[in-house]
Amino acid sequence: MSQHKFKTTNIRGKQYVEVNERIKFFRQEDQYKNWTISTDCSLSDDGTEVLCKTIVADTEQRVIATGTAHEEKSSSNINKTSFVENCETSAIGRALAVMGIGIDASIASANEVKEAIAKQDKPEDVEQDYQKAVTYLKNAKDRKDAWGKIEKQSKTKFSKAQYSKLVEYSEA
């Protein structure tokens, strides 16, 4: 393999290769000339989830590598309109990574890592946590004790406005 230098994206201190970089490399290298990348995506019955499988095959159509990915339509703002495309891109990136393309630091692509981080930091989850905290405070016999537990567990998750409202409930 050539000594190609892949463009990377720094995410939380680690370097990740983007899928487009893996695809460009695959398409430009003579050793992969006339090889194929094919994808097969299946939507769930209710159309809210997709599973994609990518196959990379050589000129004789022997399977060299596969990659799979799963996405949920509701998992991010981008996925609301493009969850099938995101899933297909991830599956392609993983198949190329299995071939050894762009994996100096990680098999995961920058796109996959960004999506995973976004899923962890979903605002809806914070809003649900906030609503649980409000309900817990309102129903607590000892609000001071309840407030202490909430503050200890999740003070930094909430916006200033949410935090101020929780302080109000705890003092009421």
Image (cartoon, grey):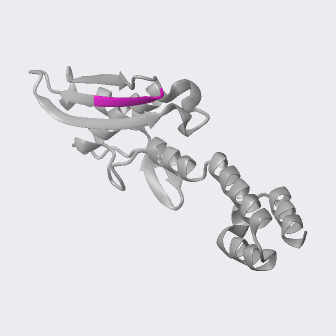
Viewer-closest of 153 and 57? 153
In screen coordinates, is 159 left or right of 153?
right
Viewer-closest of 47 and 84? 47
Q: Is residue 149 above or below residue 8?
A: below
- Is the stretch drawn in magenta largely helix, strand or loop? strand
Q: Is residue 63 above or below residue 94?
A: above
Q: Residue at x 20, y 23 (%)?
A: 35
Q: Residue at x 52, y 54 (%)?
A: 10
Please check the rendered image and state whether residue 58 is part of the magenta-colored stretch, yes or no.
Answer: no
Q: Where's the C terminus, which quadrant?
A: bottom right
Viewer-closest of 159 and 145? 145
Q: Where's the N terminus, which quadrant?
A: top left
Picture coordinates of residue 36, whole percent (x, y):
23, 22
Picture coordinates of residue 152, whole percent (x, y):
68, 76
In screen coordinates, is 62 left or right of 102?
left
Q: Residue at x 33, y 43 (%)?
A: 4
Q: Is residue 102 above or below residue 30?
A: below
Picture coordinates of residue 46, whole percent (x, y):
45, 23
Q: Which quadrant holds residue 85?
A: top left
Please check the rendered image and state whether residue 52 is part of the magenta-colored stretch, yes or no.
Answer: yes
Picture coordinates of residue 84, whole percent (x, y):
45, 26
Q: Which quadrant holds residue 98?
A: top left
Range shown magenta: 48-53
Does any portion of residue 168 appear in the rendered image?
A: yes
Does any portion of residue 30 appear in the rendered image?
A: no
Number of on-image labels: 0
